Amino acid sequence: MLRTEKAAVVLDVLQRAYPEPGCPLHHRDAFTLLVAVMLSAQCTDARVNMVTPALFEVAPTPYALAAMSPQEVQGYIATCGLAATKAKRLVAMAQLLVERHRAAVPSSFAELEALPGVGHKTASVVMAQAFGEPAFPVDTHIFRLARRWGLSRGKTVEKVEADLKKLFPKQLWNSLHVQFVLWGREHCPARGCRPTCTICSRLKLS
């Protein structure tokens, strides 16, 4: 089966399963989304959604977060992985937003990636979900599934992202990255494809 044919199968199943996928990370605006995505590194979205309500109550804006100490922030996110490091980066990120961007989250990849703790994947999620800019963030779920389904042989996140962008229409990138993640969690996790994964069965992988 050609790679384009595999992509058509994947698109058909995902569009039927999740016709209107929402962002799995709870947020109020671009700033709270940025915080949530930074917290999601090596941590489940469910865990992030458990800790952010209390954090957002005391730090709903860059000004409020910038005024906190890393130790204070760590107290709210202690159950997330790498809490101490994330707390330092969150405070530094908020301080830079206040100093350079008048407390507004910038809407460009370059400016986002210049913020402490913000890599390309995090910037891509914010650009896609907060600003509606076409992006295809590749996390561990997407990296695994793209290779498992034969959509890419890339050995790096950058190569997999480039391959996926070539295979799928640009106007679908923002929804597709969420659909990939949801499907991976529910039907095709890292430990192995489940019987409910119709993508693997249609691709004759299971």
Image: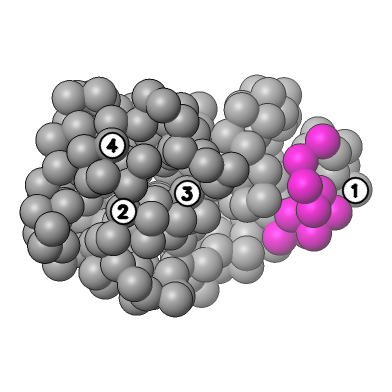
SS type, badge 3: helix
Comparing labels 2 and 1, the label whose residue is closer to the camera: 2
The residue at the point 11 percent across, 62 percent down is 2
- Location of residue 178 by image quarter: top left
Distance from Cα at disc 2 to Cα at disc 4: 10 Å
Residue 201 badge: 4
Is tag 4's residue or tag 1's residue first in the polypeptide sequence? 1
Residue 202 spot, x, y in % from top left: 21, 38
Do labels 2 and 1 touch, CB within 8 Å? Answer: no
SS type, badge 4: helix
Position of the N terminus, as image quadrant, is bottom left
User: Is residue 37 something that shows in the picture?
Assistant: yes
Dot 1 corresponds to which residue?
71
Dot 2 corresponds to which residue?
149
Q: Is residue 81 magenta?
A: yes
Q: Label 2 neighbourhood size at 10 Å, few (<14), some (14-19), many (20+)?
A: some
Position of the C terminus, as image quadrant, is top left
Dot 3 corresponds to which residue?
141
> What type is the residue that disc 4 sits on?
Ser
Distance from Cα at disc 4 to Cα at disc 1: 49 Å
Comparing labels 3 and 4, the label whose residue is closer to the camera: 4
